[in-house]
């Protein structure tokens, strides 16, 4: 075997350009598999992190305003519906909703925030303290508002870092300052005291999660919206495994309160766990497709190995004849050329792995690739198998030559 390897290396070195181009085809295939699978994995991780940033243990009930398309059994298209504090109280009853941990009503208003001449348009979200926990927001400085602030209708607000940076000078402490919120359409305005600043959450892919302002919903309704209705409810389940049960409980309660069926319920109910599962499934399919596309280049590289080995066998026909004439068995010739094909594949696989790992360190179209160790082993293993498979025919052809025919070859 040592002698076969030595002869194979000499054969590869004797045709450096040809061997280099063959290795290039394989390394492109191996590198492409590693990089594209890493891109798929990185994209999947990014999407899942964005969903998780919204809260993975939550269910969102969105008010559509009216009964949906077509007539319901007891309601009509013209029947208006709302989400009210009575719905919140009904969903927090442990007797009928044992898998619901908290219910946070949301009353939103698009306002222009002003502080000493600086202005910034921001959506003021009126809610309860449980909303911050349910949506994974954390206070970085100061404090969050309390249930007492909700009850007392206190004019206090907690700001996101983007809102703070647009209203206050760099390095300025906003805690205790008064910010005026006024409707851009000329509606009501009110002054709120900043009591807390939230830790940064970044973007979820579509919106800046730090461009926020949270206040007691009672104050927002009194001072800004002038309505007792809610745009949505954020429900936190007792555990991720109980979210499906919690969703069923929410659906039944709201259907009963609106005198309709679950199918005709005039609310959109989004389960974050279901979104996460669906996203994960779609991204796995996407990653497999990327890997399959990259694997095609490995196949092309394998064809290159066969092509180069067929040329090598043709060029070395007289050498094969001499070896067989002095007693080399068929197996020795077969192994000699098979080893050469496998060595080309190993060289291509090793360099391809290096290129793949290096390429995965760079962001690609905004996605940070995440290397999957199994893809490295798979790509390298397939490269070696490709070398064996596509090198077997040329090696067998060389081993099957009759010595007399090989020696006569010109």
Image: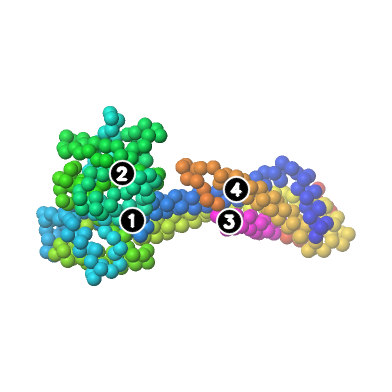
Quarter occupied by residue 321 = bottom right
Disc 2 marks which residue? 195
Looking at this view, is 178 or 211 the one in front? 178
Element at label 4: helix
The answer to whether residue 187 is visible is yes
Q: In the figure, 137 relative to 59: above or below?
A: above
User: Which colour assignment does the render follow?
Assistant: rainbow
Disc 1 marks which residue? 134
Q: Going 34% across and 55% down the picture, which residue do you hit?
A: 133
Element at label 3: helix
Give the distance between the C-alpha atoms of the residues marked 4 and 2, in whole angstroms: 47 Å
Q: Earlier in the sequence, mark 3 or mark 1?
A: 1
Mark 1 or 2: the one toward you: 2
Q: Earlier in the sequence, mark 2 or mark 3?
A: 2
Disc 3 marks which residue? 373
Q: In the figure, 162 relative to 52: above or below?
A: above
Please provide percent x and percent y for residue 39: 50, 49
* 307 lies left or right of 66: right
Give the distance between the C-alpha atoms of the residues marked 4 and 3, in whole angstroms: 10 Å
């Amino acid at each position: 075997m040592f002698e076969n390897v030595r002869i194979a290396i000499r054969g590869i070195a004797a045709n450096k350009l040809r061997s280099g181009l063959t290795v290039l085809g394989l390394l492109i295939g191996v590198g492409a598999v590693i990089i594209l699978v890493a891109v798929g994995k990185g994209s999947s991780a990014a999407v899942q992190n964005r969903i998780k940033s919204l809260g993975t243990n939550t269910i969102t009930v969105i008010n559509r305003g009216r009964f949906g398309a077509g007539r319901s059994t007891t309601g009509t298209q013209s029947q208006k519906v709302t989400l009210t504090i009575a719905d919140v109280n009904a969903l927090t009853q442990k007797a009928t909703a044992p898998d619901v941990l908290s219910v946070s009503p949301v009353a939103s208003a698009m306002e222009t925030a002003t502080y000493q001449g600086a202005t910034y348009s921001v959506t003021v979200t009126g809610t309860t303290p449980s909303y911050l926990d349910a949506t994974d927001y954390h206070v970085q400085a100061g404090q969050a508002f309390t249930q007492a602030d909700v009850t007392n209708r206190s004019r206090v607000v907690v700001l996101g870092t983007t809102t703070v940076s647009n209203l206050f000078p760099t390095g300025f402490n906003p805690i205790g300052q008064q910010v005026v919120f006024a409707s851009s359409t000329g509606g009501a305005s009110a002054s709120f005291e900043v009591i807390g600043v939230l830790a940064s959450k970044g973007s979820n892919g579509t919106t800046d999660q730090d461009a926020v302002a949270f206040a007691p919903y009672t104050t927002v309704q009194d001072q800004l919206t002038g309505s007792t209705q809610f745009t949505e409810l954020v429900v936190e389940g007792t555990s991720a495994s109980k979210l499906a049960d919690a969703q069923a409980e929410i659906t039944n309660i709201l259907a009963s309160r609106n005198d309709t069926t679950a199918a005709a319920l005039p609310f959109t109910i989004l389960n974050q766990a279901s979104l996460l599962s669906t996203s994960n499934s779609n991204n796995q399919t996407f990653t497999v497709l990327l890997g399959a596309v990259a694997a095609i280049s490995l196949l092309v590289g394998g064809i290159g190995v066969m092509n180069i080995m067929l040329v090598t066998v043709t060029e070395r026909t007289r050498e094969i004849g001499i070896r067989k004439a002095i007693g080399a068995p068929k197996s020795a010739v077969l192994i000699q050329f098979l080893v050469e094909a496998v060595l080309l594949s190993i060289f291509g696989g090793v360099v391809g792995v290096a290129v793949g790992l290096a390429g995965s360190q760079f962001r690609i179209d905004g996605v940070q690739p995440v290397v999957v160790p199994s893809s490295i082993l798979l790509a390298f293993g397939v490269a070696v198998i490709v070398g064996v498979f596509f090198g077997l025919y040329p090696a067998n052809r060389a081993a099957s030559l009759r010595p007399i025919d090989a020696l006569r070859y010109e």
